[in-house]
Image: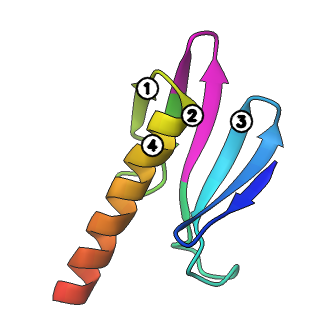
Amino acid sequence: MRRVDRELETIALTQASWRVCDARLPDDDGTRLLAYVEQIDDHVETLWMWPNAGECTTTASLDLALSAILERLLARRILLEAS
């Protein structure tokens, strides 16, 4: 599965794991990668690459994980616009 919308690009790495990127940035931009997401039994783990690389959070579904990633992405954009 590869899903691209206005904000996020979600690329399947396996049947149960995904790489999530900022769809607005070019492929060669190192800050494009936002998180890795993996379905594990009854929950989804998100390994963040921004803002705290290595931070791991847990949600109940892929949709909730993507919502959390989108929230952080929008917060990052607000921070960048303010500087």
Distance CA(mark 4)–CA(mark 1)? 16 Å
Q: Nearer the viewer, mark 4 or mark 2?
A: 2
x, y percent for residue 28: 68, 82
Q: Is residue 11 shown left or right of residue 41?
A: right
The answer to the question of whether label 4 and label 2 lie on touching residues, with beta carbons closer than 8 A, is no
Residue type highlighted by circle 1: Thr
Distance CA(mark 2)–CA(mark 3)? 10 Å
> What span is colored magenta in the figure?
35-44
Query: Vertical placement of 51 versus 5: above or below?
Result: above
Query: Vertical placement of 45 versus 1: above or below?
Result: above
Tell whether position 81 is magenta. no
Residue 17's disc is 3
Residue type highlighted by circle 2: Leu
Q: Can residue 52 be seen? A: yes
Residue 62's disc is 2
Seen as rendered, the residue at the extreme top is: 41
Q: Residue at x 16, y 86 (%)?
A: 82
x, y percent for residue 21: 59, 63
Distance CA(mark 3)–CA(mark 4)? 16 Å
Q: Can residue 51 be seen? A: no
Residue type highlighted by circle 4: Gly
Residue 54's disc is 4
Q: Residues within 10 Å of mark 2 (few under 14, many from 20)?
A: some
Q: Residue at x 80, y 43 (%)?
A: 13
Q: Residue at x 32, y 76 (%)?
A: 77
Q: Earlier in the sequence, mark 4 or mark 2?
A: 4
Q: Residue at x 33, y 55 (%)?
A: 71
